[in-house]
Amino acid sequence: MAEGETRRMPPPRGQNFRGVPKQKVKKGTVTRLLRAITQGNWLRLMVVAVCIIVTAAASVAASLFLKTLINDYILPLVKQQTADYRPLFWALCKMAAIYLAGVAAVYLQNRTMAVVAQGVLKKIRNEMFAHMQTLPIKYFDTHTHGDVMSHYTNDADTLRQMISQTVPQTLSSFVTVVAVFVSMVATSWHLTIFVVLFIAFMFFVTGKVAGQSGKYFVKQQSALGDVNGYIEEMMNGQKVVKVFCREDRVKEAFDKKNDALCENTTQANRFANNLGPINNNLGHLQYVLVAILGGLMATRGIGGLNLGAVAAFMQLSRSFVMPINQFSQQLNAVVMALAGAERIFDLMDAAPESDDGYVTLVNAKTENGALTETDEHTGHWAWKHPHGDGTVTYTPLMGEVRLFDVDFAYVEGKTVLHDISLYAEPGQKVAFVGATGAGKTTITNLINRFYDIADGKIRYDGININKIKKNDLRRSLGIVLQDVNLFTGTVKENIRYGNLDATDEQIIDAAKKANAHGFISRLPQGYDTMLTSNGANLSQGQRQLISIARAAVADPPVMILDEATSSIDTRTEALVQKGMDALMKGRTVFVIAHRLSTVQNADVIMVLDHGRIIERGTHDQLIAQGGTYAKLYQGAFELE
């Protein structure tokens, strides 16, 4: 992206004015999620299946045993003059054993599903993060960081709840319903027909209510990601918000996004919260009706029913309705989890950064006057170029960069670079000067292949960069960005990020080149001082100096300095400039700077305006021409 530009991508089709999708969950999401759950977990899922069967069997057996308990143990005691409670006691012990088996099965099932759920989430997070590392810069330019983070938190949590609770509960409900239905038919098929008809009515009501809540749960997940993205953006820009007194404006914007989330969540839960009470009350009504109908049939001898059979059937009917109620209450969790899964899979399905390069960077040495590859770290590098005829040639890494008639557009039809041609010989310092949005940073992004050009060619040491593998290309380039990113870790670890094989002596030497050694030595633990929150315990200038030292320890042949000293005061800049001159010695350097004083000693200065090079030459040559650069230098003109 050209510096200073903020590109807003148009909302995708199928979204309303709040950015909330209208479409339903994709069909393939369910099968893909099931595949993720079952892969590598078949043994654990078989254990869960056995536990579910044992639980269902225990529930049915306990209900059926109620008939035997009443008819064979309780009613005979009523007729006995001298009651013997020992048979009843042992019968109750049998019932307790049945319930205990069910409890043990439920306990084992829950423990096993917890392991399965966390294992699946761990695998999904690993795959999601690994895939995220393959995504192009464009993906992160068009997606808010908060929304991406929401995939790892909110969306993943909905999956955890579904896998650990909803899935086993649904399977248990299904097995229980089947087992109870068979037992009900065996007890009284007359009453079973009545219960089935009543359950069909309950399904009709449940379907109507769940259908209304489901679509809003899908919208809720997307709106939640939108809110998280906005919060993350405002946290990062809190100083800017306060400087420009925009607290009321950002609160208004947040209120709109929060209202969208509140509306969708309220609508979803309005229907979802009514689902449980509706089903429970219908279940109670069905229980009462079965008792009345069963009592009438038993007293009149219809269907061979007796008191024990009616009591058992009533218990079976409750066991039949309860799993259905539980399943209906889990529908909301299923819809939310599927919505979260779809968002996760969308990230995992995002097209990775393409790389058709085949030229690689290797350690090299010279033997008998010829350049050859070696496994030793010689400090010399070469491009390994395999050819179609099976031969391999080696080109020494020099740092020569040439652009030929390059055009580029971030969005098709809106070209931001026009016919850019330039060359940088090994060891040259090339400076880019121009207004914000002129295309300075865009050129360096193309050299790194963060974006690929639409037309023209870029050659690196005479090799088309499209033929060079991106990782190898970027290993040969050192970058110091205007926006510094420091990671949680020590100062030493942050500098070593540029070269993981660097010794402590090399790290200190790089810090000295960047003139960072002085202030690092004064830190509480020196190079072992822990940095957190992007180096919040350091000044902006100190953070930039560490960034420069990180690039120095990488020791690349080509260096890109994108406003590298913009966050450093004039006094610090003078100290850094000496170190930068030593750092740039013998390297090809591209410098982007608004301060013209920092580019006066460049071998060539490119003046850009609206994506075109309008002037080029040394500082003295451009001043002598009296053109745009001279006016800029004299402060009499600004590029627009």
Image: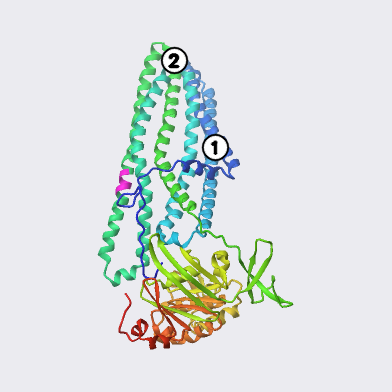
Q: Does residue 156 appear anywhere in the picture?
A: no
Q: Is residue 11 magenta?
A: no
Q: Earlier in the sequence, mark 1 or mark 2?
A: 1
Observer-nearest of 306 and 574: 574
In the rendered image, the vertical position of residue 189 relative to residue 637, given as above or below:
above
x and y percent of residue 475 in the render? Answer: 56, 70
Label drawn at residue 105? 1
**Contact, mark 1 vs mark 2 (Cβ under 8 Å):** no
x and y percent of residue 201 in the render? Answer: 35, 26
Q: Does residue 217 appear anywhere in the picture?
A: yes
Helix, strand or loop at mark 1? helix
Quarter of the image where the C terminus is located:
bottom left
Q: What's the distance in space between the residues labelled 1 and 2, CA to CA?
A: 33 Å
Using residue 389 as the reference point, say whether residue 444 is left or right of it: left
Packing grade of label 2 (10 A; few <14, some 14-19, many >=20) is some
Label drawn at residue 305? 2
